[in-house]
Amino acid sequence: MLEVAVKDIVKGIVINNLTIYAKRLSKGRFKEEINLDIYLKNGNEEAPLLYVKVFYGRKPYYKPWVEFFGINDFINLGGRVFNYFDSIFEDKLLSHFSNSINLGESIYVEYYNDEETRRQLDANFPIPVSRLGYKLFNLGFSGFKNWYFPEGFMEGGIKLQGEKPMNNEVKNQQLREIYDKVETFLNRMENLNFYDSYIIKAVERAKNIINSIIIN
């Protein structure tokens, strides 16, 4: 449940003797929405990581969702510098909230400062082979949308949406679509010589996805 995930992050989660916690909790635009200012702390030293917006849902009309935004890619904590992307902090926060998201519910993650993901999505690679998309795929999300062009004034910056499937039928359909897109991507890359690390990583993820997808 998202309520439990929020309570735990307010208390603080310890990783490698460092603590991730919500320093501030404030009301959002709606009564069902809250904002969390997430910080990384070591003793008396602390630095901002990102903001998390949680919407608990409004039955029967709107399902719950979580959004990550304002992500600091480099964190300076008392002279110790951390890179957020591909770190244990990113993995912990994504899994912490993703494990509390139920079927049919979504997570949104801003990727403006995530150079690898941004370049891969700008190149029209399949979302699951991008750096961030692959993480979400492995956390059980199979429905994806790239919000690369916000449609109004309230949506914020460019972000990736991952949605958990409503049921096995939807999951199988989404996995088939992912498989087909990833297979097409691999066929397009076959016999090409490339040296860009972002392409090499995407191709490796694509192979892993093809080998891992099992449709019931």
Image (tube, rainbow, N blue to C red):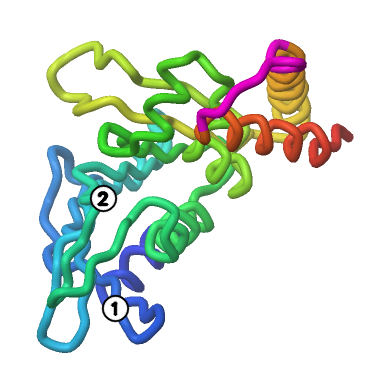
Sequence-wise, the earlier of marks 2 and 1 is 1
Residue drawn where x is 22% and y is 27% of the image: 157
Query: Where does the magenta region start and end?
Result: 188-196
Expressed as whole percent of the image width and height from the top left, the position of residue 17 reads 35, 86
- Give residue 29's quadrant in the image: top left
Q: Which residue is mark 1?
A: 19
Closer-to-camera residue (195/74): 195
* In the depicted structure, whether residue 56 falls above or below residue 187: below
Expressed as whole percent of the image width and height from the top left, the position of residue 101 reads 49, 49
Answer whether labels 2 and 1 touch (C-beta < 8 Å).
Answer: no
* In the depicted structure, whether residue 143 falls above or below residue 55: above
Examine the residues drawn in magenta and state their main secondary structure: loop
Q: Which mark is residue 73?
A: 2
Q: Residue flagged by tag 2: what amino acid is it?
A: Asp
Q: CA distance from mark 2 to mark 1?
A: 17 Å
Queried whether the magenta region covers residue 88, the answer comes back as: no
Looking at the rendering, in which quadrant would you find the C terminus?
A: top right
Expressed as whole percent of the image width and height from the top left, the position of residue 45 reads 12, 80
Position of residue 85 in the picture relative to residue 1 (left or right)? left
Closer-to-camera residue (166/52): 52
Residue drawn where x is 47% and y is 25% of the image: 120
